Image (cartoon, coloured by chain):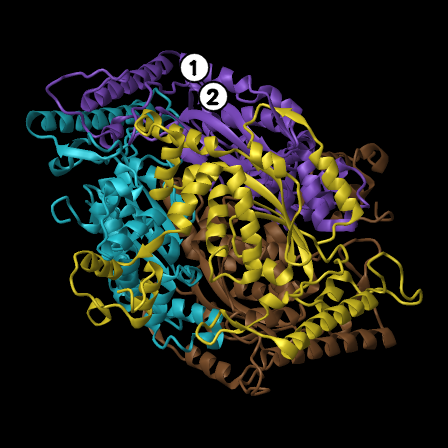
Chain colours: A purple, B yellow, C brown, D cyan
Amino acid sequence: MALSEQQKQEILEQQTQKNTTKRVISPKLEEILYEAVPVLDHGFVRVVDYMGDDSSIVQAARVSYGKGTKKVSTDSGLIKYLMRHRHSTPFEMCEIKYHVKLPIFVARQWIRHRTANVNEYSARYSILDKEFYLPSKGNLAAQSTSNRQGRGKLINGQQADNILNILKKDAEQTYANYELMLNEKYDGSTINENNKGLARELARMNLTLNTYTQWYWKTDLLNLLNFLSLRTDSHAQYEIRAYADVMINSLKKWVPITFEAFEDYRVGGMELSAKSKSVIQKMIKGQKCDFESSKLSKREWNELMESLGFTERTL
Amino acid sequence: MALSEQQKQEILEQQTQKNTTKRVISPKLEEILYEAVPVLDHGFVRVVDYMGDDSSIVQAARVSYGKGTKKVSTDSGLIKYLMRHRHSTPFEMCEIKYHVKLPIFVARQWIRHRTANVNEYSARYSILDKEFYLPSKGNLAAQSTSNRQGRGKLINGQQADNILNILKKDAEQTYANYELMLNEKYDGSTINENNKGLARELARMNLTLNTYTQWYWKTDLLNLLNFLSLRTDSHAQYEIRAYADVMINSLKKWVPITFEAFEDYRVGGMELSAKSKSVIQKMIKGQKCDFESSKLSKREWNELMESLGFTERTL
Amino acid sequence: MALSEQQKQEILEQQTQKNTTKRVISPKLEEILYEAVPVLDHGFVRVVDYMGDDSSIVQAARVSYGKGTKKVSTDSGLIKYLMRHRHSTPFEMCEIKYHVKLPIFVARQWIRHRTANVNEYSARYSILDKEFYLPSKGNLAAQSTSNRQGRGKLINGQQADNILNILKKDAEQTYANYELMLNEKYDGSTINENNKGLARELARMNLTLNTYTQWYWKTDLLNLLNFLSLRTDSHAQYEIRAYADVMINSLKKWVPITFEAFEDYRVGGMELSAKSKSVIQKMIKGQKCDFESSKLSKREWNELMESLGFTERTL
Amino acid sequence: MALSEQQKQEILEQQTQKNTTKRVISPKLEEILYEAVPVLDHGFVRVVDYMGDDSSIVQAARVSYGKGTKKVSTDSGLIKYLMRHRHSTPFEMCEIKYHVKLPIFVARQWIRHRTANVNEYSARYSILDKEFYLPSKGNLAAQSTSNRQGRGKLINGQQADNILNILKKDAEQTYANYELMLNEKYDGSTINENNKGLARELARMNLTLNTYTQWYWKTDLLNLLNFLSLRTDSHAQYEIRAYADVMINSLKKWVPITFEAFEDYRVGGMELSAKSKSVIQKMIKGQKCDFESSKLSKREWNELMESLGFTERTL
């Protein structure tokens, strides 16, 4: 990631602000506020604003439960209780805003999270940066043969070089033609004084989906947790996971108690269906329980054993 | 409005916070942060947190439009442009949180604004305060005879006294019976040692709709403007309007430029239908235009003339 | 529940409709369409419209996955797969609309489900029916002593009679005074020709929270499942659970495959935290695992054992 | 637009369905149900399901207003009243579902309407069709010189040919390389038996933004009106307007009364700010009113005069 001089200057100015407020602050998050954390080859994530901290969740819950919360004596205990029982509304009382630079195909997955506010760089108004995502060799995976949407083994050697070469050349060519149609270089210089420039809203259609865009993305803590739970999952595409992994770090700094509860109850946990629960109960009681008697489909049985970390042999 | 000693203490502690932040602040809003502004006889509104200010709207818009915004040279000009053309997403980049004490029948109207986060005092967990709304005599209006949902002339004299007496007595009686069924006074003392207390979630059903409740209510600036636009309107019920009027003041302090644009383009403005527009065009050209030739319904014609401030005589 | 003659007539007319459509239909749901199923003492739930069926979920999923869905050969297998992996968007492709009559305190819980469309009977425009909820003796529970929001043992004998008597008398008195302030009986007759009637929007505040209201409530299948999952849960207040239980039946008729998956993966299932999962794993392996070594709080340990159906003795 | 044989067959089967239902139907919409209406060069829009009609809006409004609606005697009068006063919730009681084939850059604009349900063809699971949008010569506009986001004059002659040639060649080349990287043709045949295929979720990033995708898109009537109001506007990009224009036709068939009200109050109408209103009032009274005395910005003044159809000369 190479920030422009102007961006560096802007970030520096933001970071040297020192305002006095009566609002609660999150000291650890303040430390990294505005900082652009690199993601992928040209992307970044930076927290640009936030509202509330762990205590805001507690405050909202205590308004709800009134004197009824007295029994849960600590903030940490209360937040865990809320998370465990999916009492979700107090988590909506915190808000965070990110500035993100990301490839368009990642943006298309991200935007499916509807309960968020977004302002994206508009290619109707402005010319997009000449930046596109190229996977590292360590991420150049073949289509999975067992999972319709996943990645399988790495592609190596000459084929890998060929693929990276294609991605690079096609992105460069389509961008060069984008400028040609616009009759304008990204730096603003005109290409041919005798020509008009094609409307930007049209010319952009020639760009490839790995072109970078950027946006401000704002959401509440509950919806951030949903986003992170889905997008840090091993089934999420690597490229969006790379963003989620960086955002997990900001979560940890912002609301450390919530982060801990999230790790315990969401990330590290699992869901059991009625049938799977019945399997578990039998296993614990030491009763015979194999696939045949489980009433699960083969796929479910395998998923269950895998989630529990059991293999044929360990059972 | 009488705050409890505990509430006064809590507010004082909140107001004496002095934290250092890199976030933008809204200086005028900081001044009134946490302050409980009285509304109706026992209610209040107080801002307890916020995120962003006018500059956050501009920042988000400039990310969208990129270099394309250079032409609109001032922040004020840009915000007015956004408001005028209903480019609404940048206004979603600011967030505010209120703590509100309000009668249940007002809460029932308020909650219909769905794009907000809410934590309400739960009468399943805790006992509600012994506080209920009684209208002032100046608000004791008869049902309107012309408008099915509105208020007409004031009710005076003995009838007014009778009504206020009924409201007061019924609220007091139902509350006393609420305590009796709970077998517990609001202060926590038991009424009859030999009795059980009815479940709180059941006992509450005996309370009248003017009983006060409270909640934390958090929304973004765009949805706040929608709320204020609808709830400060003269057709809104007086009691919810009283809250909206106080909140308008916090809007003004928080985002003064947006407030000004809101006043010009939303509050003071009007909408014209295609047919009404045609009427206006004729009028300006000095062409004959009366109800008969307007193609408007009588009701629409009257609404149009009223909005423009014309009476039979002035035309 | 006593339907008025007018309501009975309206339902009859709706049920005798026989239209031809190219849309998919749900034959079992058509059978009970418009039928008012009684809930509590005066409430009802009736399905008044719907869109789509199980096949609509499959259709939407197949558009998403394209040829990728071929491997999941049956509709039932696909719907189960979607439910298990919380691939939720295809379930949003079905929509249902209910007409519900319910006490106001139930409506206040219900409305917290924001992703729905609602049109409620307006007490600003019209006079509310003289109908209020009185619990049956079998539901007159004391406040739970172990759970801050729940119900404990039944209240019996004289105390139960007293409570029911209070609820009935207070509701009747406040309603009579409502009419008196309106200066109008529910049947439209004027009470005192010399008086004005208080504005309806004001008079309603004298009613108790067990007064019945009604609304049209429309939501998509995904949000209906969320609603049902929360509101059929044993921790939900009995009165809203009574509605959810009736709605479960319409779910079963409407989308039988989804219903089955819902029962297996949501209703009958359970969630494990990371720590609880670790406990389970040890138990299955026959390793020593008791509360002390579990790292769970006492409360979590008890919840886990209860969910698994274990008592001190069975372990 | 060329439908595949399989698609044609599927549509034919859908259209020959003849089910009996007790639900209300919209006869005119039934006539075009499932029909794929061509948009742009390879896109289409087709209505695949719906719920409710004009009468559903009236029904919901009458539940809200109860006896209070008696005064508005006709359905048409009531719907117009609701539209005029932005009583929007009854319009949410109708729902419609479209199947749309559209270029990705159009999909990116469309998805910003958040209050809708979407299932899009997933390029993680399946290979995208070899179809991309090429503008017709009549739409090959230069960037506007007066409006930062709009289109100006047409580009003609050799430059137009060059641009179309670029768009075509780049799309074809990037698609061919997409297949090469996948090591699989769209028809499923393998390209090189010795190579692996790159994961689909990666290969897709090489496609240009004019590649076609498709989705099911479902929304309620209120949000459809918002979508159409914004996207049929002359400031909307031509390519999304082409879709909105086709959808307007389905609106007209589905809910003819609502359509008429929409045309009068939304499409053909205009908004006046407080300052603009003051200008209008002066003009009607025949008072001197020019730009200098108007307090409007030059831009606003021009917009106002243009909306009213006045030019320097006509005034």
The residue positioned 75% from the left and 45% from the top of the image is: B7
What is the quadrant of the N terminus of chain C in the image? bottom right
The residue positioned 29% from the left and 20% from the top of the image is: A171
The residue positioned 67% from the left and 63% from the top of the image is: B133
Q: How many marks?
A: 2
Residue A179 vs C102, above or below: the answer is above
Report helix, strand or loop for mark 2: strand
The outermost residue toward the left is D157
Subunit under mark 2: A
Judge the density around disc 2: few (<14), some (14-19), many (≥20) Cα neighbours within 10 Å: many
Q: Which is in the foreground here, disc 1 or disc 2?
A: 1
Q: Position of residue B173 (x, y in %)?
A: 77, 71
Asked if residue A189 can be seen in this view, the reply is: yes
Q: Nearer the viewer, residue A292 or B181?
A: B181
How far apart in space, not on screen, are marks 1 and 2 (Cα)?
9 Å
Residue at label 2?
A44
Q: In the shown orientation, is residue D32 left or right of residue C27?
A: left
Which of the numbered marks, if any, corresponds to residue A3? Answer: 1
Q: Nearer the viewer, residue B40 or D64?
A: B40
Q: In the shown orientation, is residue B104 left or right of residue D102?
A: right
Choose top left, top right, bottom left or bottom right for residue C290: top right
Q: The disc labelled 1 sits on which kind of residue?
A: Leu
Asked if residue C272 can be seen in this view, the reply is: no
What is the quadrant of the C terminus of chain C in the image? top right
Q: Position of residue A263 (x, y in %)?
A: 66, 32
Q: Position of residue D151 (x, y in %)?
A: 20, 34
Residue at mark 1 shares a chain with residue at mark 2: yes
Q: The disc labelled 2 sits on which kind of residue?
A: Phe
Subunit under mark 1: A
